[in-house]
């Protein structure tokens, strides 16, 4: 995970199943809470460019003092380095989906990019679980194999801890078409950056519309030796995983996926997750074409 390879290119559009039928609107996938993008490299090509952004502080373990807004602004600067301007799709597994939302808000003020949609992979809405319940939730211990080095375990564990911290502090962005959020949903004034400073972008006065989103949702619960569910299953009973508390009807579509939160990218599920990502991106592109 070298910094100079961030974002990393996973697939070109022409790597897909039909090189003559491709889209050049890229999908940019953001790392999960562990900071890595290994799972995305398990995907098959989908007929459009796929980029990944991994946590550049995986090795240094330097906390993101500015929280999710700081992370999003930095990741947008990485996109400027590598990803062609124009229409793009953002997405990510778990924490990556949350980061995608904040990045979409940053890019809403950027005249060079048009985020036509977000694909979240089993991302739980911040604030949908009360802090006391979250602390009682079971931490899943089965995510590392016997071959995983202690060094890797320590780094991933640190990334998870920092992700939990910034999620707990996070106030989700508001949009000019925000008339659906529930009281107390923790929306941040859309005219402000994450550090409370007003945006200096000359385009910041244009209308900022929340892009359409699609949720790929795990159907199984994480197996635990307890009557208390895993932390990632505390809102599993809610089909939207808590996101309707942020914006009613936030998702254009919710797609059930085989596996639980930590097995959704497992080898036996690779074909289904790849197919669902491809279909989600195609649907978001069709919506964009219809609105232009």
Image (tube, rainbow, N blue to C red):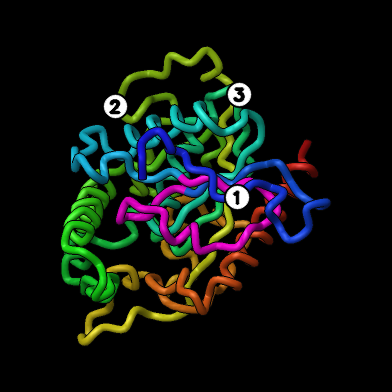
Residue 70 in the image, given as x and y percentages of width and height: 32, 32
1 vs 3, front mark: 1
Q: Nearer the viewer, residue 156 or 227?
A: 156
Label ID, residue 195: 2
Residue 52 in the image, given as x and y percentages of width and height: 48, 46
1 vs 2, front mark: 1
Q: Nearer the viewer, residue 123 or 145?
A: 145
| Element assignment for label 1 | strand
Q: Residues within 10 Å of mark 3 (few under 14, many from 20)?
A: few
Bounds of the magenta segment: 30-52
Q: Earlier along the polypeptide chain: callout 1 or callout 2?
A: 1
Residue that appears at 23% across and 44% down: 59
Q: Disc 2 vs disc 3: Cβ atoms closer than 8 Å?
A: no
Which residue is situated farthest in the right direction here? Answer: 20
2 vs 3, front mark: 3
State yes or no: residue 273 in magenta.
Answer: no
Asked if one can make out residue 193 in the rendered structure from this viewpoint, the answer is: yes
Report, in whole angstroms, how far the alpha carbon at label 2 lies from the one at label 3.
23 Å
In the rendered image, which quarter contains the C terminus?
top right
| Residue tagged 1 | 11
Residue 208 in the image, given as x and y percentages of width and height: 56, 31
Q: Residues within 10 Å of mark 1 (few under 14, many from 20)?
A: many
Residue 291 in the image, given as x and y percentages of width and height: 76, 40
Residue that appears at 70% across and 53% down: 47
Label ID, residue 112: 3
| Element assignment for label 3 | loop
Q: Earlier along the polypeptide chain: callout 1 or callout 3?
A: 1
């Amino acid at each position: 995970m070298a910094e100079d390879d961030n974002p990393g290119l996973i697939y070109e559009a022409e790597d897909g199943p039909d090189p003559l039928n491709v889209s050049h609107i890229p999908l940019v996938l953001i790392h999960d809470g562990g900071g890595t993008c290994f799972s995305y490299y398990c995907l098959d090509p989908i007929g459009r460019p796929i980029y990944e952004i991994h946590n550049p502080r995986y090795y240094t373990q330097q906390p993101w003092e500015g929280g999710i807004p700081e992370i999003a602004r930095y990741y947008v600067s990485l996109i400027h380095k590598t990803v062609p301007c124009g229409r793009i799709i953002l997405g990510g597994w778990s924490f990556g989906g949350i980061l995608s939302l904040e990045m979409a808000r940053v890019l809403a003020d950027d005249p060079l990019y048009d985020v036509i949609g977000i694909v979240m992979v089993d991302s739980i809405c911040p604030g949908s679980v009360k802090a006391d319940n979250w602390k009682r939730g079971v931490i899943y211990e089965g995510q590392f194999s016997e071959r995983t080095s202690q060094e890797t375990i320590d780094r991933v564990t640190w990334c998870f801890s920092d992700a939990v911290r910034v999620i707990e502090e996070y106030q989700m962005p508001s949009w000019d078409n925000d008339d659906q959020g529930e009281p107390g949903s923790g929306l941040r004034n859309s005219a402000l950056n994450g550090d409370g400073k007003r945006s200096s972008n000359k385009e910041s006065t244009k209308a900022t519309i929340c892009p359409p989103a699609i949720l790929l949702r795990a159907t199984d619960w994480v197996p635990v030796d307890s009557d208390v569910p895993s932390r990632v299953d505390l809102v599993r009973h809610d089909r939207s995983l808590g996101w309707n508390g942020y914006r009613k009807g936030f998702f254009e579509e919710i797609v059930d996926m085989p596996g639980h939160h930590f097995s959704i990218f497992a080898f036996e599920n690779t074909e289904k997750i790849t197919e669902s990502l491809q279909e989600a991106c195609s649907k978001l592109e069709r919506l964009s074409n219809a609105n232009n």
